[in-house]
Amino acid sequence: MEKNSIIVTGIGGNVGQGVLRNIRDLNLNVLLIGTDIGAFTAGNHLCDVSYKVPYSYDESFIDSIVNIVNKHQVKLIIPTTDYEVYYLSLNQDKINAKVVVSESYTTEKYLDKYLSFLHHKKHNIPFAKSWLPSEYNGEVDEIIVKPRKGRGSRDIYLNPKKPENFSDEYVIQPLHKGKEITTAFYVKKDGNLHGVFTMERELENGTTVKSKTTKAFDEKLREIINKMIMCSEFRGSVNIQSIVNNNGDVIPFEVNCRISGTNSIRHNLGFQDVKYCIQEYFLNQTPDDVKIIEGVALRILHDVIYPNVTEYDKLNNNKSDFKLY
């Protein structure tokens, strides 16, 4: 009989690869399956098998996932991209495996930064003031323009000369100055908050390259998070990106209803949200207590090298001879 199987999506990105490494660290007897829009990715060597799938908003995406689930008796799916979170949540009833996601109406609000702002404003929860380009009238001196949905820190513009030229597929926010922090929180099956973990961070090209643990903002963050939980149905791991200004105000500017890209760092600093997902939804266990330790992390570049190979086509799992260097 085939092992119980877990799907991790988006394995071409750092989020998915971190999730794969964290699952490997748990030493489970599972078949680990990766999916991505690319056939050959840096995550392939961490998987027992991998599959190329359509974009999540393609009408054939769900059918592709259903076929993989049925073929491998998949028990659990952990999505790692914003769009996949929404579409898998929306179609959970069609999939014969548990998807670790928040409710679809929650993922829809937080897929779109402008809808996130309107939701927080309605419930008096802090969030960066946001405008559509069509409604912006120069209210602040410095601005940042970014896509309303997803895009992983791409297509971002600082202080463009003509913000009115952007379509309403973008959102405008004040360019807040201060410390950038990234916060993960985990909501258990029963809807209760399990724990919160925050790091100050520095980014390059939208990716965290340097970070350190901080508890300085926990009180304010817990107040924000508890209000968020009261107004939405979160499950699993959620990420908040915020700026702490010179007055000490915590200003969230983006919320992602998924495990974030620093999951591999958190895993080694006492906040193991991938493990909590596995414990609750795969092993039917109570998640371990959160035991955060102080720490600093740097991101470095590694190579995955396949000697004596001339084609990419068959390099889709961990059976191929490879070297990490």
Image: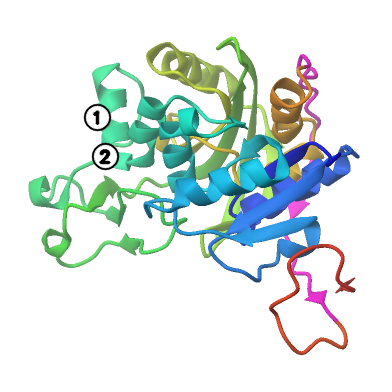
In the figure, residue 26 lies in which quadrant? top right
Residue 197 sits above or below residue 162 on the image? above
In the figure, residue 12 lies in which quadrant? bottom right
Relative placement, left or right, of 90 versus 238 is left
Relative placement, left or right, of 203 versus 50 is left
Q: Residue at x 87, y 43 (%)?
A: 25
Q: Amino acid at mark 2?
A: Tyr
* Number of marks in the rendered image: 2
Crowd band around label 1 with a 10 angstrom C-alpha radius: few (<14), some (14–19), many (20+): some
Q: Position of residue 147 (x, y in %)?
A: 31, 54
Picture disc at residue 118: 1
Relative placement, left or right, of 120 versus 209 is left
Q: What secondary structure is the stretch in magenta mostly built from?
A: loop
Q: Amino acid at mark 1?
A: Leu
Q: Is 303 inside the magenta-drawn segment?
A: yes
Q: Position of residue 244 (x, y in %)?
A: 47, 36
Badges 2 and 1: C-beta atoms under 8 Å apart? yes
Look at mark 2 in the image and give the residue it sits on.
114
Figure quadrant of the C terminus: bottom right
Measured in 3D between alpha carbons, the distance from the residue under mark 2 to the one under mark 1, in whole angstroms, is 6 Å
User: Circle 1 sits in a helix, a strand or a loop, which is it?
Assistant: helix
Q: Residue at x 73, y 67 (%)?
A: 316
User: Circle 2 sits in a helix, a strand or a loop, which is it?
Assistant: helix
The stretch in magenta equals 285-306
Q: Position of residue 209 (x, y in %)?
A: 65, 58
Q: Nearer the viewer, residue 298 or 74?
A: 74
